[in-house]
Image (spheres, rainbow, N blue to C red):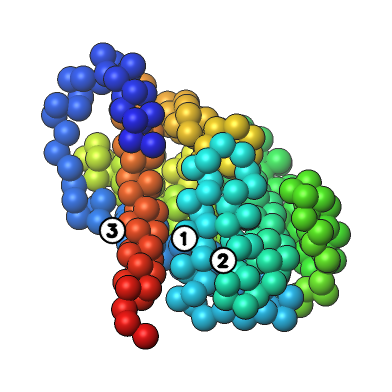
Amino acid sequence: MLFFAARSLATQWGSFESRFTHIQFGWRSISLATLVVLITYALLIEGWRRILVAWDSTLPFNDAARIWFLSNLGKYVPGNIWSLTAMGVMARRRGLSAIAAAGSSVLMQTVSLATGAAIVMITGAKLLGQPILVGAAAVLLVVLLLLAPRYLPPLASWAGKLIGREILPPTIPAASVWTAAVASTLSWLFYGVAFELFVRGLLGSAPGELSSYIAVYTAAYLLGFISPIAPAGLGVRELTLAAFMTQLGLANEADAALVAIAARLWLTIVELVPSGLYIAAGATRKSLPH
């Protein structure tokens, strides 16, 4: 990840060399942004735990966080199945069904994609230029959330076939789905807040409205996520982020390119640190005498 980021930085160095040398990092804003991201991770993990209930499975939060962080490392490998595979293996070691882990993850991702797409249309009014479409997206989001307990089980079964796993569609409690939907919706909003804080800490200011930062980050993340080849959306997310920031007037081209690359490095580190701590904790437990 560091290699690809450095290579991308080198190819664009000429466009923002002078800007980079005058950066004064606002560590308070960056630290606050990091805290918001960690809270967002906690929301997503709790949403996943609530959906596990549909398969009559439960996990303590700490175990769920460990599985979530470590299995997420699979997204840095090209292809979109490695995270689910790792999650299934780790779930079996915790006495859960691999199908429960994979199925609940697919459902959580489906809810996140649906809410994320709606949020992009709602918060990206300036980008879309279609107020009627924004209102329709808000109505669609509400309808999707209300009908989620009905359409998600067959969708999980269909998604299971795509990844080569038989996922038996359970009867999903409506409360679990709505809890996951609320968690995913809040997570997109929190990511946008964290992104604005990071931009403020990196560039010294964050012009524009908060809704624009939410729209830009969510759109870039979604496009990177659905990319079938790029590991963790590498390249796709950065190009989208920089292009949308420029289009919405949040930064000039040089600053937008700098933000896109710096944000990738920042979020990668924020994600890898908890993963590394869980790996170290696991190694320590294995080394202790029984």
Measured from the top left, where is residue 7 in percent x and y? 34, 23
Residue 38 in which image quadrant = bottom left
Q: Secondary structure at mark 2?
A: helix
Q: Secondary structure at mark 3?
A: helix
Q: Is residue 174 above or below residue 199?
A: below
Q: Nearer the viewer, residue 160 or 206?
A: 160
Q: Is residue 180 visible?
A: no
Kindly identify which residue carries mark 3: 32
Amino acid type of the residue that numbered disc 3 sits on in the rendered structure: Leu
Numbered label attached to residue 90 = 2
Q: Residue at x 18, y 47 (%)?
A: 26
Q: Is residue 164 above or below residue 203?
A: below
Label 3 vs 1, first from the N-terminus: 3
Q: CA distance from mark 3 to mark 1?
A: 21 Å
Q: CA distance from mark 2 to mark 3?
A: 32 Å
Residue 14 falls left or right of residue 232: left
Amino acid type of the residue that numbered disc 1 sits on in the rendered structure: Phe
Kindly identify which residue carries mark 1: 69
Q: Is residue 230 visible?
A: yes
Q: Nearer the viewer, residue 199 or 74?
A: 74
Would you say the residues marked 1 and 2 are in contact, meaning their CB atoms lie under 8 Å apart? no
Q: Nearer the viewer, residue 279 or 131?
A: 279
Dot 1 alpha-carbon crowd within 10 angstroms: few under 14, some 14 to 19, many 20 or more: many
